[in-house]
Amino acid sequence: MTPAKGAEDAHAMSPEEVEDMDPGLARERTELAWTRTAISLAALGGAILKQTPAVGVLVLATSALVWGIGRLARGPVRPEADDRRLLLITIVVTGVSLVALAVALLGSGKSPLTPQ
């Protein structure tokens, strides 16, 4: 029994050629991992911000740095969707997040969920 022709060709190619031929979803998974890490750091920074503002701001800045590195790592961007719709979604989500952060920081400190 002989191996499939595609398997022979894959062994003869360099790793870069194989990745270009069928990259699968590896790039998307990597981009999502960077984004997930940045969001986790931002959530942690928001939680820390109420107790220790200096440390919270530092963690929030680190999340922005991680997100930026993830954007650089993904390579050139191919426009696949309407840029105006994505910009609108980004602005709305950022606005809602900032309002939630302001409410959390400026709130009374007493949670309505705590038993009385």
Image (tube, rainbow, N blue to C red):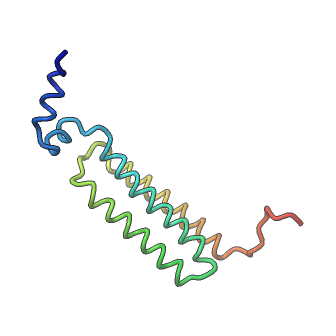
x, y percentage for residue 73?
Answer: 27, 58
Q: Residue at x 17, y 26 (%)?
A: 6
Outermost residue on the bottom side: it is: 54
Position of 72 relative to 8 (above/below): below
| Residue 56 spot, x, y in % from top left | 53, 77
Q: Is residue 53 left or right of residue 23?
A: right
**Image quadrant in which you'd find residue 49:** bottom right
Query: Which residue shows up at 81% across the image and 65% down it?
Result: 114
Measured from the top left, where is residue 2 in percent x and y?
Answer: 16, 18
Q: Nearer the viewer, residue 87 or 58?
A: 58
Q: Residue at x 79, y 64 (%)?
A: 112
Split into 4 quadrants, where in the image is the N terminus? Answer: top left
Return the residue found at the far right: 116
In the rendered image, residue 11, in percent from the top left (x then y), is placed at 14, 35
In terms of depth relative to the viewer, which is nearer, 59 or 104?
A: 59
Horizontal side of 108 relative to 38 (left or right) equals right
